[in-house]
Image (spheres, rainbow, N blue to C red):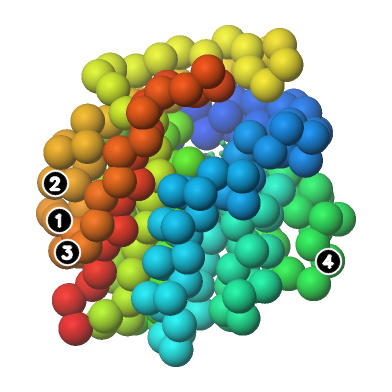
Amino acid sequence: MSRHSIDRPADLDAVRDSYDRVADNYVHMVRTTGIGDIRRHPWLKASIDAFADSVDGLGPVLDVGCGPGTVTAYLAGRGLDVSGVDLSPRMVENARRLYPECRFEVASATELDLGEATLGGVLGWWSLFNLPRAVLPQVLAHFARALEPGGFFITATHVGDGDLRRTEAYGGVAVEWTTHKWRPEELVELIERAGLAPVAELRIPADEHTGPGVVVMARKPA
Ligand SMILES: C[S@@+](CC[C@H](N)C(=O)[O-])C[C@H]1O[C@@H](n2cnc3c(N)ncnc32)[C@H](O)[C@@H]1O
């Protein structure tokens, strides 16, 4: 599959501009409140630790939609060969500033040029929910192809029915994006259809900051 075989989301530019606008507030939120920082959420941290243990010794790891690089840097600190990509140039600027020891690039999940069987692990950590429903399966198939046999994919996303149009986020900043919520069983089915075998699923109930979520980890059959 070439990078051009994934449909370009019609709202990609609006989503990029929106994340550029919220990027500084997002960083401030993560650093001052711990929201969005796995080290403050034991179950999310446990999921990322399980992923890190699983991909240890496999090929490079790519954190797709890395934002300001919190998880990328955490995984690098665990000794993994990891890099991050994000749609938003401002997120990537922040990531490079905060974690100069890590590698970050600007790219959309829909435009990655990934070689076949070149990655030991891929993350889509709270970063794939803006992809239109018809596009997510294409991106998952691209990830599955890029994983080496035995490699792992992990994703966390918002749970629910339907689509939520957001007009402001992270401190009242004007945004223009849609949060496509997934029911866990729908998401798992998509992941299976992409050719990956789910190995774990973790439900995260709503709290005072955000709605319910789900973490799914899956493995490319060896
Ligand atoms: C809620 S933030 C999560 C960031 C990071 N994964 C974390 O956990 O802190 C969502 C991120 O997904 C990125 N994103 C949205 N659509 C994307 C796309 N098509 N390709 C790559 N990144 C995307 C946004 O720019 C943003 O940085």
Mark 3 Cα shell of 10 Å, populated few (<14), some (14-19), many (≥20): some
Q: Which of 200 and 81 is in front in this view?
A: 200
The amino acid type of the residue labelled 3 equals Ala
SS assignment at label 2 = helix
Q: What residue type is labelled 2?
A: Glu
Residue 6 appears in the figure: no
Characterize the local packing of mark 4: few (<14), some (14-19) or many (20 or more) Cα atoms within 10 angstroms.
few
Mark 2 packing: few (<14 Cα in 10 Å), some, or many (20+)?
some
Identify residue for label 3: 197
Q: Name the residue under label 1.
A: 192
In the structure shown, which secondary structural element does the residue marked by tag 4 occupy? loop
Mark 1 → mark 3, Cα distance in angstroms? 6 Å
Mark number displayed over residue 48:
none
Question: Measured along the vertical axis of the image, is residue 43 above or below residue 182?
Answer: below
Disc 4/disc 3 C-alpha distance (Å): 35 Å
Residue receiving disc 2? 189
Q: Distance between the residues labelled 2 and 1?
A: 5 Å
